[in-house]
Image: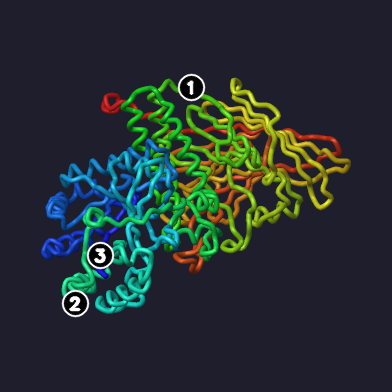
Amino acid sequence: MMLNICLSLVANSSNYSHSDNFEHQYQSIFKKLLSFLYSHPRYKMSFSFSGPMFSWLEKKHPEFLQILGELVAKKQIELLGGGYYNPIFPLIFPIDRSGQIELLTSTIRKSTGKRPRGMAFETSAWDNSLINCLHSCGMEFIMLDSSLIPTTKQFFLPQILNEQGKTIKLIPINRKFNPSILKEVSPEVYLNNLIKQIEKSTKNDAYSGKTNERILGLAFEPDLIEYLFNSGWLESFFNAIYTTFNKDLTLLLPTEFIHKTSIFVPSYIPAGIREDIARWSVKPYTIVDTKQEKSITVNDFLLTYPRNQALYNRMLYVSMLISQCHGDKARKKSAREALWQAQNEDAYICTPDGIFANNMIRQNAYRSLTEAEKYIRAADTFKESVTSYDYNNDGLIEYICRMDKYTACISKNAGAINELNIMHNTGNYADNLSRIEKFDKVDDNYDRGFFVEHLFSKDDFDDYKKGLPAGNGVFSQTIFTESEFSPQKKEIKLKGVGEFSSLKLPISLRKNYILNSNGFTVQYILKNEGPIAIKGNFVVESNFAQTDFTSVDTNSYKVEVISSDDRHELSLAKKTVSMKNISYIQVTDFSNDISFVFEPNEYASICCSTLYFKRPNINNETSKISANTFITSLCWDVDLSAGMEMEKTINFSIITPRKRRSSKKENS
């Protein structure tokens, strides 16, 4: 048996990575590795770079790309293609798939003189419908994780997949054969074991009499390559292949093998993602053995992690806006590029080690989507609108409000605002986590958006102010129904019903949104529907996602209030801050100089606090603080006799910085 090894370096760095990270990878890995390969002409590897990494190399180290081009021309190195911003292809529309592939292809061809013929899928997020797109983009082969391939088709041979008469060839990546740093063995022992395992696996299989050639795809991450190179292991590995094992092993580039072999295994690969990511997809932040599970897809992952799903919903919506735009082509092109930046996989899925998208990565993606929407508004004649449809595919109608200063999504789930994107170049202020008992010792059991209402007993209200879960979900877990919706008046009328206290007393809440360019007015009518008087506390809670990412426990907000006609700035050093007789609250995000103003029609009490969320470290180790949210709640005492009701109104305004004056005026 002759075993052909295709060795790849996968360096698809995020477009959200800082240039310092790029420089570190370049100096510690890429520069050294390229010099090594240049001085050893027999050694072959393929490289996979993301578009942002490639563009950074063009600007900062053109000499690297010049040498890279020479080695590509000598067929010592092969550059693999993919999506420019490293997207998860099954999640994006066909026009974005082909656009991202062609952008990276043209970038590589411009720098090296040769276009890529194959692609690497880092997360191996696959769907058979991708074949048509890959075929039309001129791709001959792809490299996917072997865990996606049915066991009946695993022969250490290339596969051939088809969809509606179009085909693509596949080289499996067998990560289980990657050398382990924890169980370090010499390259000779490693290669000897490799040959024995593959010979045993392929002995007397369906292809043993047809070919003596087998293939093993190995994909090394930068950290692994750095360790193997600095320890001298990689050089010994290459040397052993060409000396001790030269009769059994050979190094080939993927395209070389694809053109050399005539044996392909016809296969169908179900939609899925690589096994070491799929194991995080069943239970939040927990590794689960998925061998007995059905094929797990990236959509299963999103359903397990609501914040990732919410970002995906926003991305699809902006993509739809761009597709429907018929205005200025230049602005539409800029909008699509901003959209592509937001499609980077780091914001939607975790790494195999369980590193999840943090608040900063998601907010940067939201910022890119806001930028894309601003281009679309400028390309077309923008008109404020309120529309209704199932925005997040949960079976309920949501209300999408595109106003001058913001785009918001109002959900029937708690009747709350679960997305608030300010057009002044910021992200989604409603992008908040909820507490999970396993990590935070308590469960919230509701989504932390804007204008979430609670009806508490006195004891429950005391617990709530201490940051403890309280009450029975009235109205934070209530599904509201639509009473009236007027797109012309930009008015949404909702109604929620529930039961209060252990006596299960019927209670209802009518909640009316009246939208305007700078915010909205929310009117409440709380009614005691039962025969017994109700006493408690009515709370309107709004949760602000953090925008200062200096550290995970930084608070980026300050609060000013008017209480009994006196203005105060609240000290937020304490865990919870409360004050009575409030007629005006201004919450300012000083990272972006944006303020949010609440003006109740009657004096209210205010309760402010910063809530911290813990999540596990890499591979489910000890939990640590990973994010926080700033809570502002307006509170009123409730004392309602049977059949009586109370009415409250809150005017909510968004204050953004004024546009800067022209330089001429500034200099005058």
- In the displayed structure, 264 sits above or below 424; it is below
Are discs 1 and 2 less than 8 Å apart at CB? no
Q: Earlier in the sequence, mark 2 or mark 3?
A: 3
Are discs 3 and 1 less than 8 Å apart at CB? no
Q: Earlier in the sequence, mark 1 or mark 2?
A: 2
Q: Which mark is residue 244?
A: 2
Residue at position x 71%, y 51% in the image: 461
Residue at position x 42%, y 58% in the image: 149
C-alpha gap between disc 3 and disc 1: 60 Å
* Coordinates of residue 114 in the picture (x, y in percent): 18, 46
Q: Secondary structure at mark 3?
A: strand
Q: Which mark is residue 241?
A: none
34 with respect to 283 (left or right): left
- Which amino acid, by three-letter code, is at mark 3? Asn
Image quadrant in which you'd find residue 376: top left
Mark 1 burial class by Cα count in 10 Å: few <14, some 14-19, many 20+: few
* Coordinates of residue 163 in the picture (x, y in percent): 40, 43
Q: Secondary structure at mark 1?
A: loop
Q: Earlier in the sequence, mark 3 or mark 1?
A: 3
Q: Which mark is residue 383?
A: 1
- Which amino acid, by three-letter code, is at mark 2? Thr
How many numbered discs sit on the rendered protein?
3
- In the displayed structure, 110 sits above or below 322; it is below
Mark 2 burial class by Cα count in 10 Å: few <14, some 14-19, many 20+: few
Instruction: Work out whether residue 334 or residue 610 is closer to the camera in this orientation and state it.
Output: 334
The residue that disc 3 covers is 4
Q: Is residue 567 visible?
A: no
Mark 3 burial class by Cα count in 10 Å: few <14, some 14-19, many 20+: many
Residue at position x 51%, y 46% in the image: 309
Which quadrant does the N terminus fall into?
bottom left
Residue most extreme to the front: 209
Instruction: Work out whether residue 518 or residue 478 is closer to the camera in this orientation and state it.
Output: 478
